[in-house]
Image (tube, rainbow, N blue to C red):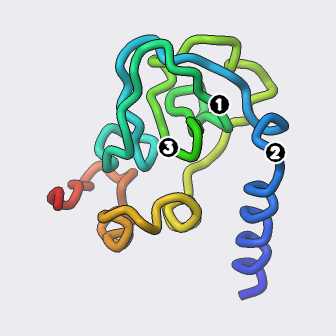
Amino acid sequence: MRGGFLFKWLVMLLLAVPLGALAQLAQTLRPVNVRAGPAHVFPLVTALSPRTDVHVVGCTEGWRWCDIVVGRTHGWVDGSDLSGAFRTPRVPFVKFSLGPYWDAHYRSRPWYSSQADWADWDTPSFRPPPSR
């Protein structure tokens, strides 16, 4: 119980830190789909045009998927769709945790209530739930 409280406190603290202190600027190379998690199977959050400036908060190992912010929109984009100097030690490697991430950014989205259906998203047998 205490570990969960500590984790939530840490997430809230990180959300309160100014974005510039945590993020590196990048730009989209082509039209990009922003996803609710680090895989093409996750729900679409929004689409971005080429040459859109984004703030990269963190990336999965090897910069495969990056957690980005554009205005008030948070989401994940394929790292190969981004240009810029974000592939530096300044941008940390992060692990995606569906519950805390969706709680922080997607409470008003129609697919938020289906979190349980996404619990095994990183297993070979996972099949995304049908779109609503």
| Disc 1 element | strand
Q: Quadrant of the C terminus?
A: bottom left
Residue 60 x/y as whole percent = 58, 36
Q: Quadrant of residue 128?
A: bottom left
Q: Nearer the viewer, mark 2 or mark 3?
A: 2
Residue sitting at the far bottom: 1
Q: At 51% from the left edge and 20% from the top edge, which residue is drawn? A: 52
| Relative height, residue 105 to residue 53 (above, below) | below
Question: What amino acid is found at the position of numbered circle 3 in the picture?
Answer: Gly
Residue labelled with disc 3:
75
Comes first in the chain, label 2 or label 3? 2
Q: Which residue appears at 45% of the width and 42% of the height?
A: 38
The three-letter amino acid code for the residue at tag 2 is: Pro
Q: Secondary structure at mark 2?
A: loop
CA distance for labels 3 and 1: 11 Å
Residue at 80% from the left image edge and 25% from the top image edge: 89
Q: Is residue 113 above or below residue 41?
A: below
> Label 1 belongs to which residue?
55
Q: Residue at x 31, y 63 (%)?
A: 111
How many neighbours does mark 3 have within 10 angstroms: few (below 14), some (14-19), or many (20 or more)? many
